[in-house]
Image (tube, grey):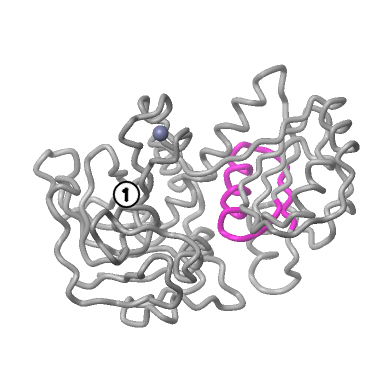
């Protein structure tokens, strides 16, 4: 069968191979036919050789961690043939650490977790894959066009879950949310904010392209100005750019008892002049919290299904700005100027 693979750690080794073996029964009892794979920045990092790890004993890694498929067979009866399904990306470490031991593999403490298409487990960019029932997330049939957004939605569902847990350390009635970065993660974070009835502001550099309209269609306000020029102090910030100046600016901009969730990953290696003492004063004197958030556990995947099912399907579809058949995979993995989310399509 077909699979999109790389040699991890070696740049420009992206290849569609035709002789990928069928998924081994040890991968799980549920056999799935691939429908679509979403592409994100992590895939581009893996392709450029910065990241990625093949399964033990293998030279190549099948990439793809944002999955959507259709169940072919499930002898356990957990799912039925024809069900739409996505695979949980991260599996707990084998030790396991105290968090993985209770299913919170998103909070793994020893780094020995594995991840489909990223770290030690074959990805979903292949014609067929297998899942264990506990890593198989069923989607409503209405999500057949947009269900490939489930993985990025699980990431923001986790971010919101933790924002709310932190918020409830004291009386908490947030009203204003700032999302920085209007890529897929930022737009989905804004979607989940609107579903909570909050006043949502999205800040991005783009003044053209689809982003301003996508934000407006959510009923949110779009800003293409520096953070310091915003005319309000947000109660919650979801930072999705990873841009160092934006990260520092939002930490100072958050209002009293503000919560700043850092969901973007910086590249590092660049220093900027910054008044750390002023930041300390802002955080201490306003009881503010800054925290990082990555990945998602099973509970967050289930919350993501609810969020996508509630959302406007047309709006979700407009995030998928390019759908590319697997035969043209090199186009899919070449970033375009107006891309929000690019999807590689397998069977239809
Ligand atoms: Zn762990």
Residue that appears at 16% across and 53% down: 31
Residue that appears at 50% across and 64% down: 50
Which of the image's four quarters has the N terminus? bottom left
Which of the image's four quarters has the C terminus? bottom left
The residue sitting at the left extreme is 75
Q: Nearer the viewer, residue 301 or 18?
A: 18
Marker count (numbered): 1
Horizontal placement of 18 versus 55: left or right? left
186 in magenta: yes
Question: Residue 181 sits in which quadrant?
Answer: bottom right
**In the image, residue 225 lies at what x, y percent?**
84, 60
In the structure shown, which secondary structural element does the residue marked by tag 1 occupy? strand
**In the image, residue 306 lies at what x, y percent?**
44, 40
**In the image, residue 292 lies at what x, y percent?**
62, 40
Residue that appears at 36% across and 46% down: 114
Horizontal placement of 237 versus 317: left or right? right
246 in magenta: no
| Residue behind mark 1 | 87
Q: Nearer the viewer, residue 271 or 92?
A: 271
When the figure is inspected, residue 110 is found, relative to residue 37, above or below; the finding is above
Check disc 1: other Cα within 10 Å, few if <14, some if 14-19, many if 20+: many
Write down the region rendered in magenta.
Answer: 180-203
Q: Nearer the viewer, residue 154 or 16?
A: 16
Horizontal placement of 134 versus 296: left or right? left
When the figure is inspected, residue 291 is found, relative to residue 202, above or below; the finding is above
When the figure is inspected, residue 123 is found, relative to residue 277, above or below; the finding is below
**In the image, residue 184 lies at what x, y percent?**
56, 58
């Amino acid at each position: 069968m077909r699979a999109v693979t790389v040699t991890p750690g070696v740049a420009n080794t992206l290849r569609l191979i035709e002789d990928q073996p069928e998924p081994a029964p040890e991968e799980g009892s549920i056999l799935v036919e691939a429908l679509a794979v979403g592409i994100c920045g992590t895939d581009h990092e893996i392709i450029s050789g910065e990241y990625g790890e093949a399964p033990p004993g293998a030279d190549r890694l099948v990439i793809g961690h944002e999955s959507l498929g259709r169940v072919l067979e499930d002898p356990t009866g957990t799912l039925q043939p024809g069900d739409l399904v996505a695979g949980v990306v991260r599996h707990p470490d084998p030790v396991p650490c105290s968090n993985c031991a209770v299913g919170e593999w998103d909070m793994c403490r020893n780094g020995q977790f594995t991840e489909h298409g990223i770290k030690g487990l074959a990805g979903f960019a292949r014609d067929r894959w297998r899942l264990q029932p506990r890593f198989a997330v069923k989607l409503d049939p209405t999500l057949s066009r947009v269900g490939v957004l489930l993985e990025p939605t699980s990431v923001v569902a986790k971010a919101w879950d933790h924002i709310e847990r932190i918020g409830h350390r004291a009386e908490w009635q947030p009203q204003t949310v700032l999302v920085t970065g209007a890529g897929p993660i930022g737009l989905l974070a804004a979607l989940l904010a609107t579903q909570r009835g909050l006043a949502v502001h999205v800040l991005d550099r783009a003044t053209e392209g689809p982003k301003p309209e996508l934000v407006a269609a959510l009923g949110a306000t779009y800003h293409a100005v520096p953070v310091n020029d915003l005319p309000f102090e947000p109660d919650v910030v979801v930072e999705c750019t990873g841009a160092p100046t934006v990260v520092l600016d939002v930490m100072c901009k958050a209002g009293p008892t503000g919560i700043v969730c850092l969901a973007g990953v910086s590249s590092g290696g660049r220093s900027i002049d910054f008044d750390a003492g002023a930041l300390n004063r802002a955080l201490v004197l306003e009881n503010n919290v800054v925290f990082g958030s990555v990945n998602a556990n099973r509970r967050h995947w289930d919350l993501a299904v609810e969020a996508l099912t509630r959302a406007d399907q047309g709006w979700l579809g407009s995030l998928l700005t390019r759908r590319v058949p697997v035969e043209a995979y090199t186009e899919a993995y070449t970033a375009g100027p107006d891309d929000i989310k690019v999807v590689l399509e397998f069977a239809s």
